[in-house]
Amino acid sequence: MLKQEPQDGEQSLADPNFRADVLSGLGGQPRAIPARWFYDRRGSELFEAITDLPEYYPTRTETALLMQIGPQLGALAAPNAAVVEFGSGSSTKTPILLRAIDPAAYVPIDISGEFLRHSADALSQAFPGLPVHPVEADFLRPVPLPVQVARLPKLGFFPGSTIGNMNAFHAVDLLRAMREWLGEGARLLIGMDRIKSPDILVPAYDDAQGVTAAFNLNLLERINRELAGTISVDAFRHRALWNADAARIEMHLEAQRDMEFTVDGRTFAMDAGETIHTENSHKYGPNGARMLLRAGGWTPIREWTDPQDWFALVLCEAQPLRMAP
């Protein structure tokens, strides 16, 4: 899909951070664009569809775990807590948590404003007595929480193994930022995907129906639409592979032929077989998960896994920092 160049005097409405990440990512070697830019309205809808696919085990496994441990979460959460979810509320997982702990307020944070408002409206209707305070923001940058929840105890909710989309350096940075935003004494319920056979992992990111491929290719559609791109989307194909050394699934967009295109007035050339690296999904064993959380300032206090040990939910606490053993 091609987008016409803006007319003279016309102001681009593209997010300047999106523009900067795309231009630097396409100009780098290897080429890479951060996965957070998948989530325009169409990308968010496609991801919701991915979560229902038979190959995509994380959502149904985590959902079943949440339903199983709901009574325990109700007993472990602070009374009158505000649930702060990093990402728009899932239509399945978030209601399970909200029913289990009966919070005083709910704060969803998401970069996709349209999808955020839609999910916040849906949860407001499902929980008419619950104050919902959506925050449109990139939670990889500082996020001021609404003043309405400033004095409430906080329970952070970070499901879906989204932490796995970051390398360890950035994951630790994010966990430390979450600790700062939520405050000492806060708790965090986080989903973390386990290391398992590539025969299970790869199909989860390269489904037979091609929904994940459409999700990946939609990033190029967004670049064309928002940054005056001239990328031939049908000249790329989706690739998913298991990188055993890094313990992660990688998603790429692979050029099927030599090509040249422009984005925001800049020209780029790619050779056939060259890729744009669009996502990582790191998987963690139990010890690696605990070490990552502790490095981020969170002390694991409870952990639950499914019978196959495919997925874990970890409840952590921002305990006082100790400078000595």
Image (cartoon, helix red, strand yellow):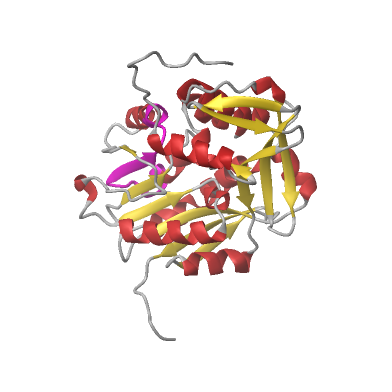
Position of 109 relative to 231 (above/below): below
Position of 3 relative to 252 (above/below): above
Residue 143: percent from the left, percent from the top? Answer: 32, 48
Of residues 67 and 241, which is closer to you in this image?
241
Quarter location, residue 48: top right
- The residue located at (63%, 59%) in the rendering is 284
- The residue located at (55%, 43%) in the rendering is 63
Of residues 238 and 264, which is closer to you in this image?
264
Instruction: Residue 112: say if magenta.
Output: yes
Specify the quadrant that holds the N terminus: top right
In the rendered structure, the answer to whether residue 317 lies left or right of residue 106 reads: right
Quarter location, residue 288: bottom right
Q: Which residues are magenta?
A: 98-116
Residue 89: in sight, yes or no? no
Position of 142 relative to 22 (above/below): below
Residue positioned most to the right: 199
In the rendered structure, the answer to whether residue 72 lies left or right of residue 268 reads: left
Residue 293: in sight, yes or no? yes
Residue 2: percent from the left, percent from the top? Answer: 56, 15
In the rendered structure, the answer to whether residue 192 lies left or right of residue 308 reads: left
Position of 66 relative to 135 (above/below): below
- The residue located at (53%, 52%) in the rendering is 163
Instruction: Residue 152: say if magenta.
Output: no
Residue 129: percent from the left, percent from the top? Answer: 26, 35
Specify the quadrant that holds the C terminus: bottom left
